[in-house]
Amino acid sequence: MNLHASLQESAAWFELLDPDQQARVVRDTTIAVAEPGTIIEHRGGIGHAWIGVLSGLVKVSVSNIDGKTASLTGVPTGGWIGEGTLLKRETRKYDIVALRQSTIARLRGETFDWLLDNSVPFNRYLLHQLNERVGQFIGKAEYDRLFAPDARVARCLAELFNPLLYPSKSMRLEITQEEIGYLARISRQRTNQALRALEDAGMLKVEYGAVQVLDLDGLKEYDV
């Protein structure tokens, strides 16, 4: 894998760095492939790296001592997660789990800190990302409590097309109905019903193993 080219394609912040900074990032980033169900990072572990999804799909989840699990969000190709753990220098408060085979990048924490000290554009990017993530979780708390399953699926999909958190030029996302159900926390059967309702409303097209979004603003506002 050409890591430099992969970061150019899957890390919006990489293009904001100067050539020397890019070279250090490439040198200090490792790549691994995670199979479906693999816990990429464990809750309670020390954060040593910033985690990027170069391809695939992962979920951020929490669980209790009884084994009950709650998905907090999904992170598709182009997303980076874990900056809060590095900034606060605390143990990780969630698991990061691969939902499908995913190529995972790990940027060393020391290099992450070095970028904070040496790149104003990187700081500005990170500030926007943190602000957007706060808004995302406030919105999720709202629709998890107030919205019916169809609207929960709509908002869940809209999250995965957030241009700041998960930059992508495509409105097609490779994701199965089972994976959507994991993220929206509803059954696969109910997910199928919700997707059909959204398709009938002209907001998306369901494909085999993928969803093509036709009306992103409509998904963001859907509350039927």
Image: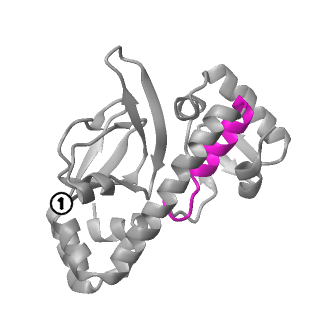
Residue 116 among magenta residues: no
For image coordinates 37% across by 81% down, the residue present is 121
Asked whether, in this view, residue 105 is left or right of residue 129, the answer is left
Task: Work out whether residue 135 or residue 209 is closer to the camera in this orientation and state it.
Answer: 135
- Magenta-colored span: 148-165
**Residue 124 lies in quadrant:** bottom left
Q: Is residue 147 above or below residue 186?
A: below
The residue where tag 1 is placed is 108
Above or below 117: residue 189: above
Locate the C terminus by quadrant: top right
| Residue type, numbered disc 1 | Arg
Q: Is the N terminus in the top left, top right, bottom left or bottom right quadrant?
A: bottom left
| Numbered disc 1: secondary structure | strand
Residue 106 seen anywhere in this rendered image of the structure:
no
Instruction: Assess disc 1: are there few (<14), some (14-19) or many (≥20) residues with their C-alpha within 10 Å of its C-alpha.
Output: some
Q: Is residue 209 visible?
A: yes
Q: Position of residue 212 (x, y in %)?
A: 68, 49
Q: Position of residue 114 (x, y in %)?
A: 18, 73
Its colouring scheme is one colour
93 or 121: nearer the viewer: 93
Q: In this view of the protein, which residue sits in the foreground, 204 or 160?
A: 160
Q: Residue at x 30, y 32 (%)?
A: 38
Horizontal side, residue 212 vs residue 47: left or right = right
44 left or right, relative to 184: left
